Amino acid sequence: MAQPRLIIHGGAGSALKDPSRGDRVREALYAVIDPVYEMLLDGASAFEAVVEGCRRLEEDPTFNAGTGSAIQSDGQVRMSASLMDGATQSFSGVINAMRLAHPVELAEHLQGERDRVLDGAGAQELMRELGVPPHDPIVERRFRQWIRERERGFSKQAVEVVAQEDRTEQDEPDDRGRGTIGVVAFDKDGKLSAGTSTGGRGFERVGRVSDSAMPAGNYADAHCAVSATGIGEHIIDACLSARICVRVADGMSLEEALRKSFDESEAKQYSFGAIAIDHEGRIGWGKTSDILLAAYRVGDEVGDTISLPGGTIVGVLGALQGV
């Protein structure tokens, strides 16, 4: 039996202008990571832990996923989520789903289906079949932000990394982060899974598809599991999550795979971050963005990446004894 490992994230982007927001994000992440880690200690599979972690993060309006998601240019929230079970190398997800609390639950259901990735219309039909109750994910802070941006002609590139208390227009930072959430888990049997969920960039053209329901943004196999966050188009261009996993499968260490991938991305001026765990229990993260809002737990050790300095950084915790 291996000691479980768990890492979660709540977005990556520009630096937080208010340091107290980092404390609030840390508290929100730790409130999720502890109960989900206890699930793993009690024998839950990596896949089960990932689903529950994503559900809990989707429930917290601090993050841009589920309730509290960003609003698109037409005033609607469209959410995307995916899961990948490393044990079966099975990917499932929904793209631009509307009026539900937990898009990750649809992705979970689709793991057992022949058609495993559905668009908005397909997601709506699946909700009807499953009896999923409608839910309004819009929160006041996002709505006020959308109103301001509509008045500006949606000139801002994206919403903040995390939701914040409403502030006056002149005090609002030009924070171009993307608050996608993600969970990567390693269970007692040494199996891996990854999940990612997002409300999108915010203010985007109707029909835009994010990376979160693609292997570029979420990938897992028997060797490695990765969840990415940041500028979706950059993640897609780099095919980031799948690229890292393939490099580990081809013989690179997790640190080598992360470092090579993020060095390449820095050279192309991509802005994003990723969290990962490999088959030997190494837990890692990397970023080219100013911040990566991630937290991890291994046994009694809990840590996070929230206070890391800006710029490209890769970190890896060593392999577990007995794995």
Image (cartoon, rainbow, N blue to C red):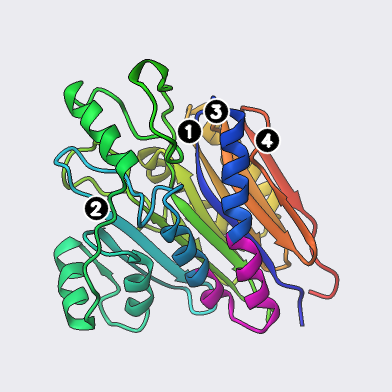
- Where in the figure is residue 174, as x and y percent of width and height? 41, 22
User: CB atoms at circles 4 and 3 under 8 Å apart?
Assistant: no
Instruction: Tell which circle, 4 or 2, labels the residue nearer the N-terminal end.
Output: 2
- The residues bearing labels 3 and 1 have C-alpha atoms spaced at a distance of 12 Å
Name which residue lies at 18% across and 61% down.
120
Q: Quadrant of residue 102?
A: bottom left
Pick the residue in front: 187 or 199: 199
Q: Amino acid at mark 2?
A: Arg
Let me know if residue 177 is in the magenta part: no
Name which residue lies at 18% across and 28% down.
150
Number of the label disc, if any, that sits on residue 174: none
Dominant secondary structure of the magenta stretch? Answer: helix
Q: Nearer the viewer, mark 3 or mark 1?
A: 3
Number of the label disc, if any, that sits on residue 307: 4
Q: Which residues are magenta?
A: 32-50
Number of the label disc, if any, that sits on residue 271: 1
- The residues bearing labels 1 and 2 have C-alpha atoms spaced at a distance of 23 Å
Q: Is residue 197 positioned above or below 146 on the image?
A: below
Q: Mark 2 = which residue? A: 78
- The residues bearing labels 4 and 2 have C-alpha atoms spaced at a distance of 31 Å
Mark 4 Cα-neighbour bin, 10 Å: few <14, some 14–19, many ≥20: some
Q: Nearer the viewer, mark 1 or mark 2?
A: 2
Q: Nearer the viewer, mark 4 or mark 1?
A: 4
